[in-house]
């Protein structure tokens, strides 16, 4: 019995020993089998092609129902055609190439990156990483509070241990939180780390010195173990301070240590406001044609095929149309400016709030900000949330016992001072104090 | 420590003991946590809603980029709006209700079925079932040859044992294949069975007597064990013989035995020709508001959220537009007729072929037909496939060492006789015979 995954596992081991060391048993055994997609790829262009279970007009064009096709007149004919047909499992070629260009704006050409693999939104990318590299023996290091869905994706589904250190200490960003967590693990044990900038729920991106400290601490941590750093770039680009870099930490971490492999998870959800489209990408720090990039692509394709069949072609075509558009930078920038304005309004409102009631944590980017409840009030974030719902017609999210998250991305600029006022009021009522 | 899943596991155990017995450890522990989606649901309608990380105009409407929005002018404003926003994790309400109506055309009202849960295409539904109900201790019974991706979804990813019996015996459909497999398992051990009609790769739906035999054999098998029957209805409706029912086996199996629970996996991929859209559904045989349906919904939502975040809103809106359309039955019927014509052309061509070269298996529905290679020729399907590619400009799929699959859904009617001629020719050349 030859192991069908043996060759591709070897390619990974040769080019990226830390990735190889971190593969889960599932990650080790997956490989795209020589099945229908492979056989269909070989048959492309044949005059008689009876390979795929896709209903066509007999010449490769789809037979969309008129009442569905007429929803997409804004796509040119060939794009509309592709919107109704299966996407290749790895994604539509042009989509992958154009997204790679978008990712690499201002990135030095010597930093390698693979052709991004299409995923069904950001979470799917995280879930593929979880499948490939985690199980109940694996630690995942991250700063707390973190996006709750990491818990479902890594711990609940895959059994990984989530180990955390505080993202903020005494009201200030803690750049070395992840490295602190890693230092508690036995030397040599492979680990995953998640870095998320701009962060959810923090709305925080490291300032230049903090960014340097963060990266250096990860490089140092890689001295102790094979270290995979998942860069969750969900909120990429949404940065509102000129001195803060909008570039992904992924680029900073490539080639910094032989034991350190960054992995990029990004997509069109936030920056392109395409929440409903579910277009995400998974990118590795290897040249597109390298054996290791191809080996990882085979593994990811096997998992994509076995979890969702193929990525969404319809959304890819809609996003492609935008990326081809000359003015896309300005369109994206216009959304960023709307959020920047809300950011400034919220920041100002929080700066003026009563610190005995609300202790805002620093934020500078993304979609959120966090407010901590003063410990001496003895209130939980859940109590405040319930009170805001019941008595102040206001919805927020309690992300931990002491933290409330404000999604300023979905509140009008003019309403943000009122939102902060209601929060103060609610806390004051619950704490038996008078609001200022 | 209270187990957050305890209540919903109890609801499943009370209403559906066989489902409860078959839950995998993962299936047992998943439950939608009280996280962002739950908190956002509670905040719906509040004047200030800062719950979700979704960029809006501050009043709940999206801010789509103009170059993306202009691709969808065929959707009315409110639908276009929803196409760009997140779908609820369980799917958009109207979509779920309309798909349930579509599923239940001609179904007696007394047969219960849940509101379908949205999935990212059919495969995602299968993969959710695999997560909930299988691991390395579980047997999955099915007829062979089967769709290869079942292997990835159930065996490679989840470690389940795939046990098979031949779908055809001496050139005839074997209605009791799955029951035969099940009878080999120790009594009392929970098992999954997959039934797929119309089938891939067989293109076969049971004729009335065979259908009765199939259902009775499954009911009998349920006498021995908790039995979950996954009805893979990917090719639903694509039936070309008047005497063959187009209804899902799901409806036949509801309420037939206390140990038997059918699960329906279907979607818009084939019947609505929406391959690129990835709109699938997962449906359980319980009333929409029942505690057990709600409990299963919580589990599925946890898995959907942790694997893909949320289903595709864009595609749901496109499919919804079609389902609302008065003429949708005729549009779907028109596609079925195109395929029926190809079916008849292929059937006729295969009936006339040289049985010493090709042994066609019976087919009557779906998108495919199978041809078996006569054993005495000593040829593998892969050899014939390669030869067809290299010398006859023709692509087919080798689904087993002796079976070639013809996807007549993607070949023009007029070309099908030529396709069969080339197959004969290729086999004859390889076998050193002269083609007829």
Image (cartoon, coloured by chain):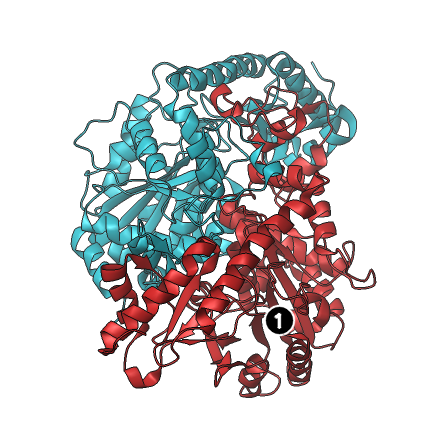
Chain colours: A cyan, B red
Query: B316 and B419: which one is in front?
Result: B419
- The residue under the point 19% across, 38% down is A256
- Say left or right for A434 vs A343: right
| Residue A385, x across and y down, in percent | 68, 33
Residue receiving disc 1: B229
| Residue A240, x across and y down, in percent | 43, 17
Q: Residue lying at the far front in this picture: please name it.
A: B436
Q: Residue lying at the far right in this picture: please name it.
A: B110
- The residue under the point 74% across, 59% down is B113
| Residue A113, x across and y down, in percent | 25, 38
Residue A436 visible (yes or no): yes
Q: How many marks?
A: 1
Question: Is A436 above or below relative to B93?
Answer: above
Question: Is B362 above or below relative to A24?
Answer: below
Instruction: Indicate the chain on which mark 1 is placed.
Output: B
Query: A362 and B417: which one is in front?
Result: B417
- The residue under the point 29% across, 52% down is A296
**Image quarter in which the N terminus of chain B is found:** bottom right
**Image quarter in which the C terminus of chain B is found:** bottom left
Which quadrant would residue A383 be assigned to in this image? top right
Query: A321 and B135: which one is in front?
Result: A321
**Secondary-structure class at tag 1:** strand
Residue A234 visible (yes or no): no
- The residue under the point 20% across, 27% down is A108
Query: A273 and A355: which one is in front?
Result: A273
- Say left or right for B353 vs B261: left
């Amino acid at each position: 019995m030859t192991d069908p995954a043996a060759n591709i596992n070897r390619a990974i081991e040769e080019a990226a020993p830390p990735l190889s060391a971190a593969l889960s048993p599932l990650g080790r055994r997956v490989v795209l089998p020589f099945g229908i997609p492979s056989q269909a790829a070989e048959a492309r262009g044949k005059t008689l092609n009876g390979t795929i279970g896709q209903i066509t007009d007999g010449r490769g064009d789809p037979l969309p129902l008129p009442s569905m096709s007429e929803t997409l007149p804004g796509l040119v004919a060939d794009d509309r055609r592709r919107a109704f047909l299966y996407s290749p499992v790895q994604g539509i070629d042009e989509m992958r190439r154009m997204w790679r260009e978008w990712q690499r704006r201002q990135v030095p050409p010597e930093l390698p990156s693979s052709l991004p693999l299409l995923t069904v939104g950001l979470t799917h990318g995280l879930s593929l990483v979880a499948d490939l590299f985690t199980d109940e023996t694996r630690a995942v290091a991250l700063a707390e509070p973190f996006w709750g869905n990491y818990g479902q994706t890594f711990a609940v589904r895959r059994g990984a241990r989530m180990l955390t250190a505080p993202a903020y200490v005494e009201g200030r960003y803690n750049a070395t939180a992840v490295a602190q967590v890693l230092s508690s693990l036995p030397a040599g044990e492979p680990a995953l780390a998640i870095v998320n900038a701009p962060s959810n729920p923090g709305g925080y991106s490291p300032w230049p010195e903090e960014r340097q400290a963060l990266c250096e601490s990860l490089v140092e941590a890689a001295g102790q173990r094979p270290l995979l750093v998942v860069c969750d770039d969900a909120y990429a680009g949404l940065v509102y301070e000129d001195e803060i870099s909008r570039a992904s930490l992924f680029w900073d971490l490539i080639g910094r240590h032989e034991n350190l492999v960054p992995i990029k998870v990004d997509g069109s959800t936030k920056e392109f406001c395409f929440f409903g489209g579910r277009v995400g990408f998974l990118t590795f720090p290897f040249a597109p044609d390298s054996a290791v990039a191809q080996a990882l692509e085979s593994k990811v394709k096997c998992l994509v095929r076995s979890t969702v069949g193929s990525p969404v072609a319809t959304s890819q075509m809609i996003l492609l149309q935008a990326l081809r558009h000359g003015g896309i930078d300005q369109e994206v920038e216009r959304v960023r400016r709307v959020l920047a304005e809300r950011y400034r309004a919220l920041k100002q409102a929080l700066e003026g709030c009563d610190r005995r009631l609300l202790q805002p944590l620093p934020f500078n980017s993304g979609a959120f900000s966090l407010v901590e409840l003063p410990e001496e009030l003895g209130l939980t974030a859940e109590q405040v949330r319930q009170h805001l719902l019941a008595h102040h017609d206001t919805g927020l999210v309690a992300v931990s016992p002491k933290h409330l998250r404000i999604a300023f991305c979905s509140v009008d600029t003019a309403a943000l001072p009122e939102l902060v006022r209601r929060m103060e009021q609610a806390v004051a009522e619950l704490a038996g104090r008078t609001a200022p």
